Image: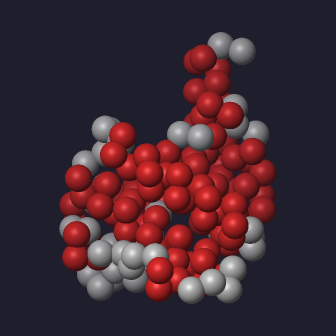
Amino acid sequence: MSRIYRVIKATYHMICAQQLASREKYEDALAHLELMHPKNLFKFEPALLRGFLLLVTNRPEVAKSIFEELRDRMSTLTRYSEADIAHFEAYLRNHIRNAVEIMGQDKSRYPEPDYAKVPVNAVTTAIKLNYPLPEHPDWNGA
């Protein structure tokens, strides 16, 4: 399979998964992501969406593992602005804590999101739409 075909296919499945997730069709969204080539599935945003979908479909252990791996990869992100990276950091911290809480563990051992570091108005619109932070005090539907 050619690289161009894989990119087109991955883009299609990512868009479908985002649209399904926005309509709370989480299992269907996850199924679309699983159709992606593994090289694309482990890229940052598809993996982030997959972690969220696993969390909301009651698979917090796997979701937490994905979120922690992505958190560890944050320093390698080069195509995002500082505001976007701060947003992702808060999003990951929030969902790691959510996963831990769902698993019945003490979430206080995990750092809380630092919303003060996230300049909501500077975050890319697509990132705000696809990975919302409604807990942010300045969110107001951003």
Residue located 46% across and 76% down the image: 110
Is residue 18 shown to the viewer in this render? no
Where's residue 70, x and y in %? 49, 52
Residue located 60% across and 17% down the image: 3
Q: Is residue 83 left or right of residue 111?
A: left
- Residue 142 placement: quadrant: bottom left
Outermost residue toward the front?
109
- Residue 64 placement: quadrant: bottom right
- Of residues 139 and 79, the one nearer the viewer is 79
Where's residue 93, x and y in %? 44, 70
Where's residue 27, x and y in %? 78, 62
Residue located 32% across and 55% down the image: 85
Residue located 37% across and 68% down the image: 90
Relative to 97, residue 22 above or below = above
- Residue 104 placement: quadrant: bottom right
Q: Is residue 94 left or right of residue 10?
A: left
Total residue callouts: 0
Relative to 9, residue 131 above or below = below
Colour approach in the figure = secondary structure
**Quadrant in which the N terminus appears:** top right
Where's residue 43, x and y in %? 53, 40
Is residue 36 shown to the viewer in this render? yes
Relative to 73, residue 121 above or below = below
- Of residues 52 and 14, the one nearer the viewer is 52
Relative to 58, residue 1 above or below = above
Outermost residue toward the top?
2
